[in-house]
Image: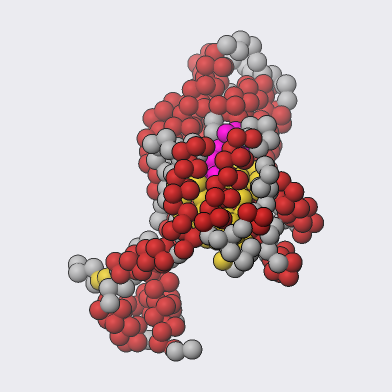
Amino acid sequence: MRSWLGGVAARLEAERDFLTQLDAAIGDADHGINMHRGFAAVMRKLATVDRATPGQLLRVTGRTFVSTVGGAAGPLYGTAFLQAGETLGDEGSFGPRRLLEALRASLDGVQRVGAASEGDKTMVDALAPGLAAYELELRTGGSLETAVRAGREAAAEGTRATVPMQARKGRASYLGPRSVGHQDPGATSTALMFAALEQAVLADRSQRFATGSRTRASRR
Amino acid sequence: MIQSVGRAARILKALGSESARLGVTELAERVGLAKATVYGLLRTLEAHQFVQQDLETGKYRLGPALLQLGNAFLDHHELRARSLLWADALAARAREAVHVGVLYGPNVLLVHHVFRPDHSVQILLVGASIPWHACALGKAIVAYLEPAQRRELLAGPLPRLTGRTLTTRQALLSELDRVVAGGVAVEDQEAIVGEAGLAAPLFDNRGAVVGAIGLAGPVEHLLPDGPAAEAVAAVKQAARGLSRELGAGRLSAPGAGA
């Protein structure tokens, strides 16, 4: 979990200007800065947390996000992390099925706060297909590794699909037809989190191979 | 209705809803007309600079004359013209963005927007159209409409824009009562997550509501623990001043004592 959150922070740092640039076209040009600031705060906070379960780490992330990030990103991502953290509870580890439940709780939370559906040109356009692809892969016999890859690919595809959409939620919707032709910044940052998730899962696997750890069974 | 004028309007709207330029064939498909007809209309519109043809690709986009007309619309808009100074003063005092809007069907059309005075990048929202029930400006206006008009709007569609949008007639009726009681409309992330608004109505010399002026900004600034008292006072003062300038008597402005 730490490896994933760290990966998200690193990617947000690298993509900060890109996200801000996307947001400048249809929003307030603050998405990259907000997300970066939020995750920098999360990293500082997590550094002070010594032993914590994955669910606790996510809840700390969500609370930190809500209190440090303004705009729509704070409440939306904050809710997503909090809901995922609640779902994972206080168990020491989690498997692919629990991750699916956590992702679904995140999507539900985001939709409750933002009332967005797929096609509205929001983060839901990356989160919903990413979650659906992850679930389909698991249900059709895929492993955690192939499922997170499917999720990453579908989230990226969903993000690209926001380009021709006319925004129906958020500030961009005020622009009406002028929002067409721009990639949604929120979907972009969500896709980036799926990419970091895949990376963290792969890193976790190679680490377990390297150390010969037998924790695998406990993670199912 | 004059058919060719209607067709020309459809072509302009088609061009306006696409970021990419469109060729004659694509346009003919969009508006459901023969290519020759569309071509003739485009040539006429081009002569008036309502559309522009890209020399390299031969495709069309909207022309500069539309911007001039748009600006003329705003310049001739009396409420907007009179609101400029009040809006600037309000933005400077409250350190937040100011919106001035009028009701246009079930939506509030923003006719003026002053950026939050902090030098950050912001996007100009003049011309934006926001469902009345989801924004402070809309609630401020509708609360003071004639009962028949208000009923009509409450019976219309009330789309949900966020989890906090009021979408039932009952909830909106009590909300409009609160607006009248307090002289100010409050928007708590009902249009955009994280965004709040405070607005007060504007009246003309007949005492009829003609629009609203208000602040728009981060919810933690405007509604730190309920509506920020100073911001509410600033909005009401600007609305009263502007209404007087529009010819409204002192008594017709609500919350005059606040």
Measured as percent of width and height from the top left, residue A44 is found at 52, 16
Residue plotted at (52% across, 21% down) = A41
A113 left or right of A187 in image: right
Q: Is B156 above or below relative to B173?
A: below
Q: Residue placed farthest to the front in the image?
A: B250
Q: Is residue B198 above or below residue B34?
A: above
Q: Position of residue A62 (x, y in %)?
A: 62, 28
Residue A90 visible, this angle: yes
> Who is closer to the viewer here, B1 or A158?
B1
B221 in magenta: yes
Magenta range is: B215-223
Q: Count all numbered tags in the image, as a single digit.
A: 0
Residue displayed at 44% across by 26% down: A10
Q: Position of residue A22 (x, y in %)?
A: 40, 44
- State the residue in front, B35 or B108: B108
Query: Is residue A214 covered in magenta?
Result: no
